[in-house]
């Protein structure tokens, strides 16, 4: 049986995860860039601003900027 790093088996953690989802909670790290910042990054890129400068303006890494500019994927997780 597969186990996560804490040693809790999946069958034991599943009810807790389902209860959290029912309460509107989901796991994972919070996003650094919200929808408004992502839109702003796209607008700046259209104006010719470099990804490095956009990253400095938003306070994120250049890789994060490229992630949001790459394909215009849906921003809501």
Image (tube, rainbow, N blue to C red):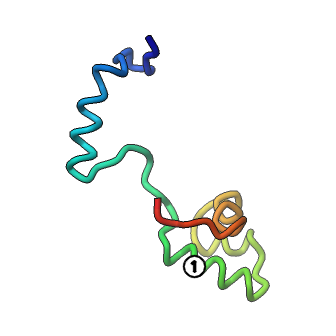
Residue 13's place in the image compared with 70, above or below, is above
Q: How many marks?
A: 1
Residue 22's place in the image compared with 45, above or below, is above
Q: Residue at x 44, y 48 (%)?
A: 29
Q: Residue at x 68, y 83 (%)?
A: 44
The image quarter in which residue 6 lies: top left
Q: Residue at x 58, y 72 (%)?
A: 58
Frontmost residue, 14 versus 61: 14
Image coordinates for residue 61, horizontal then vertical, percent: 65, 59
Image coordinates for residue 63, horizontal then vertical, percent: 70, 57
Image coordinates for residue 28, horizontal then vertical, percent: 43, 45
The image quarter in which residue 50 lies: bottom right
Frontmost residue, 4 versus 63: 4
Q: Which residue ends up furthest to the top in the rendered image? A: 1
Q: Is residue 4 left or right of residue 18?
A: right
The quarter of the rendered structure image containing the N terminus is top left
Image coordinates for residue 39, horizontal then vertical, percent: 57, 79
Residue 2's place in the image compared with 20, above or below, is above
Residue 12's place in the image compared with 58, above or below, is above
Q: Secondary structure at mark 1?
A: helix
Q: Which residue ends up furthest to the bottom in the rendered image? A: 47
Q: Residue at x 50, y 60 (%)?
A: 32
Q: Which residue is mark 1?
A: 39
Q: Is residue 76 left or right of residue 62?
A: left
Density class for disc 1 (Cα within 10 Å; few <14, some 14-19, many ≥20) is: some
């Amino acid at each position: 049986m597969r186990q996560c790093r804490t040693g809790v088996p999946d069958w034991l953690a599943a009810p807790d995860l389902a209860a959290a989802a029912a309460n509107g909670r989901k796991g994972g790290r919070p996003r650094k860039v919200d929808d408004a910042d992502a839109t702003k990054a796209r607008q700046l890129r259209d104006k010719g601003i470099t990804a490095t400068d956009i990253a400095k303006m938003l306070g994120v890494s250049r890789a994060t900027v490229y992630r949001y500019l790459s394909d215009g994927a849906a921003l809501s997780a």
